[in-house]
Image: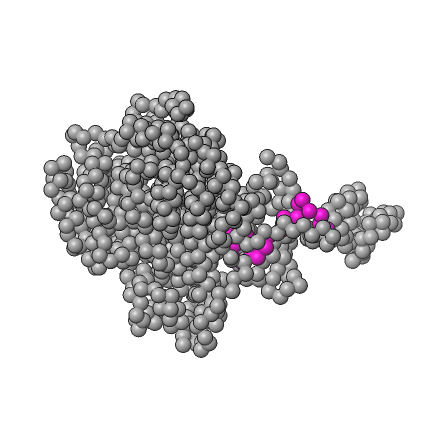
Amino acid sequence: MKGAEIVMKMLERHGVEVVFGHPGGAIMPVYDALYDSSVKHVLVRHEQAGAHMADAYYRASGRVGVCFATSGPGATNLVTGLATAHMDSSAVVAITGNVATSLIGTDAFQEADVYGITSAITKHNYLVKDVADLPRVLTEAFHIASTGRPGPVLVDVPKDVQLAEYDGPLDVEVDLPGYRPTYVGNARQIERAAEAIRKAERPVMIVGGGGQAAPEAVASFVAHTGIPVITTLMGIGAYPAGREESLGMPGMHGTVTANRAITNCDLILGAGLRFDDRVTGKVSRFAPNATVVHIDIDPAEISKLVKAHVPVVGDLRDVLPRLQALLPRLDIDPWRQQLAAWKARYPERWKREGTLASQEVIQMLREAAGECIVTTEVGQHQMFAARLFPTSKPRSFITSGGLGTMGFGLPAAIGAAFARPGERVVCVAGDGSVQMNVQELATLAKHRLPVVIAILNNGMLGMVRQWQELFHAKRYSEVYLADSNPDFAKLAEAYGIEGFNVFDREQAQEVVPRALANDGPVLLNFYVYEAEKVWPMVPAGAGVDEMIIGDQEPEEQVREEVPA
Amino acid sequence: MSVSRHVLSVTVRDQPGVLLRIAGLFARRGYNIESLSVAQTERPGLSRTTFVVTGEDATVEQVTKQLQKLIDVLTVVDHSGSDYVSRELMLIKVSVRSPDDRVEIRQIAQDFRARIVDVARQALTFEVTGDERKIEAFINQMRPFGIVELVRTGMVALERTEQVERTEQGRGRAKAA
């Protein structure tokens, strides 16, 4: 069997249904083997999009996403996608062709040191120089990508290795003495965590992306203890939004309630999160009075940024039920009342007259869509979506949190649609971001996926504009797009996708339900208020207690509102 | 936050690229390496690297955790806090300007148990082994004569046997946890 056939056989053995990729010279033997394989292939228009699709495929399903690219430019195009997956702990296996081993290191045509380039942005990577290593390497790649803290693994296969014959066994035992993730939490640490939580009067739980794999454990823990829950951008859906215990998102564009809860709490139970700087703001002002209990599967995240008083290394699915068993329902009514009062006092607000507002478009989408998968691009619309369109199901709010990759949302919608056929996908996009992978309209058109792309078009790079308005004396440097944006409806039509330009409220109310009733892809281009800002906001470098609630409304005296 | 010097022994699988990964990790996260040495061990397929790093204890703890995360890293041992033996090897070429110098240089070298490995009219080359202090002292002694060039291997270290308090962290298990 040729190396290329081994690649396809190993994918089949790992249950891979679909690969996102783009062929080229150095990976042609694999594409030749693909021709006879049962694995479906989605031809992307840019390799970066293929990596995002594989990433979103994993995030939506929990099954490893796979992408292919050729050597050199094909592989370097994957870089942003791999870095995105790496930052957000997404299980992706990327297979790249490379020039023949005899040419490696000679600056051959379409040669790049892909192994070197990707070693910093993958969980692990391989350059396979001997066809006999392929079964082992691919087995390890799937194992490493999907276990412990998930992450992307790249396997670089030179063309002569793809063509070489090998008749050895394909079944290989994984033997990685340097890789043994800890799933079971230390019993003594769990007891210490329980003691700390029992003593707390104002506890709050913060659930991050790790919660996406453990929604039942989180829900059961919260139902049992009654602990209030904050979900980070990556944790949206790990606990349903809108419940009494849900306080929303923390951090830079978090809710007033979540940030005040952090400032005033006496205990944080961090579950599957890494205390990213967008969550903590200035670390020295983050939860100044709190005992921090931190549960994470990655020991390197413990005390990396926020010191953990009680660290527990393990899988939430193991640790949370065991912790729950040691706890009663928490007697914290005054704290819950305080949180409810803040929630009531600071509802989501936006202007409702004049030009269409991004927030009301998102509201309309949410009402019309019901249960669905949401993907986003990166920018203001992403924050509006996180606040106003949080899903109640896990693995359903798919966004580039760590790397903040513009161009993620559209390919992610396609990847998610392949992961969960039959489910509606709404891609909330901005007019800036969507253009970074807009070529994928072709992929979307070809597969007629049930994706609604909602562009909140303010003719601006809105988030950059917001920062320029607030922190750069309104010097709007290079953020204006309106004079050269395409007619997005026509652009969609050019690809054979239905497209609508939406100019006002009445039109929006009519078009949105109609678009969401459609089975195929639709692009909606909403012209929205250009100077909209995302509030509240914690300025970069400030503490979450220094949040600006809205125009002319600085956060005042938060600490004095602590319940007695 | 206390800043101190740490000697880390890292056992790695002999895989291509493992050093690239370790060096990349140090560079990317801004950790400073004072010295680094790598060679094979008694176990085939495994190499041992010895790092000397200076930093805040919390930073060094991060270093060890990040090293542990690498798939090809088997164990990370931080020797600080336990008793260990450390050695370094240096080759040093000292200029010889007069017969008197030659006698004096050879006398000092004998005191240091330095071996002559190359003899020439204008220079003597020595091999010196020892802990860091001995190496530094020898360099200082030779300085007045004129050091032509020198090369050091960087420190290697082993824990002393009588005091087997292992700080070795099991893979994926933080010291703190």
Residue B28 placement (x, y as % from top left): 51, 46
Q: Residue at x 48, y 68 (%)?
A: A173
Q: Residue at x 29, y 48 (%)?
A: A393
Left/right placement of residue A309 relative to residue A77 reads right
Residue B57 placement (x, y as % from top left): 60, 40
Rendered image coloring scheme: one colour
Across the whole image, how many numbered discs are drawn on residues? 0
Residue range highlighted in magenta:
B68-85
Please determine whether, in this image, residue A380 is positioned above or below residue A1.
above
Please determine whether, in this image, residue A503 is positioned above or below residue A545.
below
- Residue A98 quadrant: bottom left
Residue A493 placement (x, y as % from top left): 15, 51
Left/right placement of residue B71 relative to residue A439 reads right
Q: Quadrant of the C terminus of chain A?
A: top left
Residue A51 visible in the shown view: no
Residue A516 visible in the shown view: yes
Q: Nearer the viewer, residue A478 or B32?
A: B32
Please determine whether, in this image, residue B122 is positioned above or below residue A560.
below
Residue A424 placement (x, y as % from top left): 22, 52
Q: Residue at x 76, y 53 (%)?
A: B129
- Residue A460 quadrant: top left
* Magenta-drawn stretch contains B18: no
